[in-house]
Image (cartoon, rainbow, N blue to C red):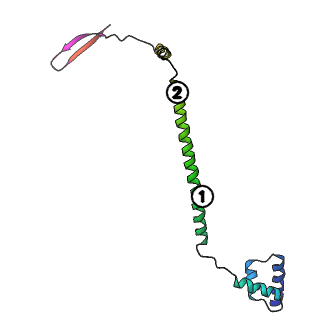
């Protein structure tokens, strides 16, 4: 039964449908009749690399370092562009507002003043009703 199983594994391996566990079992239990696979299994055993325990963590940390550098650069570049745009907008706006003459500014001020309703504030006439050292009571006369 073991020979049938190994022959089936060899066929699966040659067709590319074997799993890693099946390949490992095949390489460990191959006999001398299959010289091609025997040579290949000895090559695989000699050149097999062991993956470090924290391999994924190291990879993610290296990815994070690369992405944070590019993100920092992009954020710095966008901040610089935004600052330049803000300063240029303020400068151009200031240049445009300096073009008004004093007469134009006075006309704009008078127009703004006309928008407000002017009501005269008259002081009401008050009459004293009661007066003492601590208290004074007034009444308003209209």
Answer whether residue 107 is magenta in the image.
no
Q: Is residue 71 visible?
A: yes
Element at label 2: helix
Q: Residue at x 59, y 60 (%)?
A: 66
**Position in image of residue 68 (x %, y %):** 57, 57
N-terminal label among 1 and 2: 1
| Viewer-nearest residue: 113 or 129 | 113
| Left or right: 140, with 31 as reference point | left
| Viewer-nearest residue: 122 or 134 | 122
Q: Which residues are magenta?
A: 121-135
Q: Is residue 70 above or below residue 95?
A: below
Q: Residue at x 80, y 85 (%)?
A: 37
Q: Residue at x 76, y 89 (%)?
A: 29
| Left or right: 41, with 134 as reference point | right
Name the quarter where the N terminus is drawn: bottom right
| Left or right: 83, with 51 as reference point | left
| Viewer-nearest residue: 139 or 77 | 77
Q: Is residue 1 visible?
A: no
- Label annotation for residue 107: none
Residues packed near mark 1 inside 10 Å, few (<14), some (14 to 19) or many (20 plus) = few
Q: What is the count of numbered marks?
A: 2
The residue at which mark 1 appears reads as 67
The residue at which mark 2 appears reads as 95
Answer whether residue 126 is magenta in the image.
yes
């Amino acid at each position: 039964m073991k020979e049938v199983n190994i022959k089936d594994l060899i066929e699966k391996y040659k067709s590319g449908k074997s799993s890693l566990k099946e390949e490992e079992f095949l390489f460990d239990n191959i006999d001398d009749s299959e010289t091609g696979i025997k040579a290949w299994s000895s090559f695989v055993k000699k050149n097999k690399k062991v993956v470090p325990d924290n391999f994924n963590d190291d990879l993610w940390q290296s990815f994070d370092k690369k992405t944070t550098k590019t993100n920092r650069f992009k954020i710095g570049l966008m901040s610089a562009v935004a600052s330049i745009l803000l300063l240029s907008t303020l400068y151009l706006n200031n240049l445009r507002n300096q073009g008004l003459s004093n007469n134009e500014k006075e006309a704009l001020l008078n127009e703004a003043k006309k928008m407000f309703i002017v009501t005269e504030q008259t002081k009401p006439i008050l009459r004293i009703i009661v007066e003492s050292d601590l208290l004074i009571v007034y009444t308003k006369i209209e």
